Image (cartoon, rainbow, N blue to C red):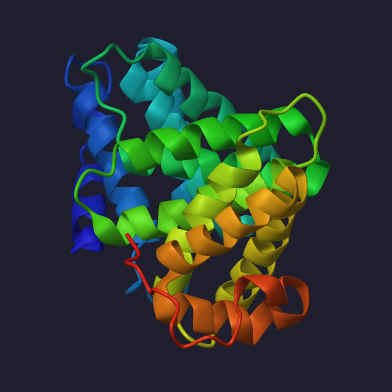
């Protein structure tokens, strides 16, 4: 159990302090503390004292070795503390440290899709609070990297398509942004929508967002683009996705989902 491991590691402080084994001991203790603080089985909730201790040990490691692992560990400790207690200062530190860890990686160094996704989520959270465009741009970059790196994990890919599509939709209409944002966002959300849970608020919000994006795609190109957009919508969403779109956004995208049982369903990816 994590508690037994933590107690055992804490008992080794005097033995490890000042030796060449101290860095490894501190890393093990930080890992154990963070595992306990992120476990669903922790009675009584997350301990602030545990997270403070983890952040202190991670800070010591960074002070003694400014490598990728140390930056990542500090970032992770502050990320977990931010999630537990909501102090924006922890979120700022987590973003800075995880960004440094990413910058320091070599081509083959460790920085997983989950790490990119975590950094993207932190940036999206800060953008929601402060509205700084740069945070949104960085979040989109990190979410793209996460989606590119999730390999064959289709469940993770579904979530990342949803999050990246939502982030791109937020950027649509902002001056000096890529003209492909609307189409990229629509493509990602259309691929995610048929797989979102029925009754989930995210499903309704995604359908509404997708409807607005599809309208914009058609309006941008005029009548010719309308037909193309309608066919694309039918092909990518399939029958189930069209039903969801029709249920949640019929007022705004009635032209994309005509009540025609003969139209092709296509396949969603």
Residue 152 drawn at (x, y percent): 19, 50
Residue found 54% across the figure and 88% down from its top: 199
Quadrant for the C terminus in the image:
bottom left
Task: Point out the image quarter for the N terminus.
Answer: bottom left
**Above or below, comparing residue 101 to residue 216 in the picture:** above
Locate residue 33 relative to residue 233 in the image: left or right.
left
Image quadrant where residue 237 sits: bottom left
Residue shown at 26% from the left, 58% from the top: 154
Q: Nearer the viewer, residue 55 or 196?
A: 196
Q: Position of residue 200 (x, y in %)?
A: 54, 81
Q: Is residue 28 left or right of residue 47?
A: left
Residue 102 sits above or below residue 192 on the image: above
Q: Is 155 drawn above or below residue 257 in the view shown? A: above
How many numbered discs?
0
Q: Nearer the viewer, residue 36 or 12?
A: 36
Viewer-side residue, 189 vs 154: 189
Viewer-proximal residue among 146 and 265 = 265
In this rendering, position of residue 205 left or right of residue 118: right
Question: Is there any visible trace of residue 229 in the rendered image?
Answer: yes
In this orientation, does residue 76 appear?
A: no
Q: Quadrant of residue 149?
A: top left
Percent coordinates x, y for residue 167 in the rendering: 62, 47
Residue at 26% x, 13% y is: 107
Rendered location of residue 24, percent (x, y): 20, 27
């Amino acid at each position: 159990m994590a508690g037994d491991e933590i107690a055992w590691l804490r008992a080794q402080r005097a033995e490890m302090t000042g030796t060449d084994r101290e860095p490894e001991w501190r890393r093990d203790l930080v890992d154990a503390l963070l595992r306990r603080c992120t476990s669903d089985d922790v009675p009584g909730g997350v301990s602030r004292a545990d997270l403070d201790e983890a952040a202190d040990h991670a800070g010591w490691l960074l002070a003694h070795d400014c490598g990728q692992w140390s930056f990542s560990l500090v970032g992770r400790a502050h990320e977990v503390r931010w999630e537990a207690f909501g102090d924006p200062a922890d979120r700022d530190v987590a973003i800075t440290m995880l960004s440094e860890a990413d910058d320091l990686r070599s081509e083959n160094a460790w920085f997983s899709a989950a790490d990119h996704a975590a950094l993207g989520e932190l940036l999206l959270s800060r953008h929601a609070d402060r509205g700084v465009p740069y945070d949104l741009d960085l979040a989109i970059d990190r979410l793209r990297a996460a989606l590119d790196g999730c390999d064959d994990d289709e469940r993770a890919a579904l979530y990342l398509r949803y999050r990246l599509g939502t982030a791109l939709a937020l950027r649509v209409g902002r001056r000096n942004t890529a003209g492909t944002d609307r189409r990229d966002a629509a493509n990602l959300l259309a691929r995610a929508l048929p797989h979102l849970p029925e009754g989930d608020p995210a499903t309704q919000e995604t359908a509404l967002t997708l409807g607005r994006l599809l309208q914009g795609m058609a309006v941008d190109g005029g009548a010719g683009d309308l037909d193309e957009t309608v066919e694309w919508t039918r092909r990518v969403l399939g029958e189930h996705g069209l039903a969801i779109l029709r249920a949640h956004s019929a007022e705004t995208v009635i032209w994309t989902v005509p009540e025609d049982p003969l139209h092709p369903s296509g396949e969603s990816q």
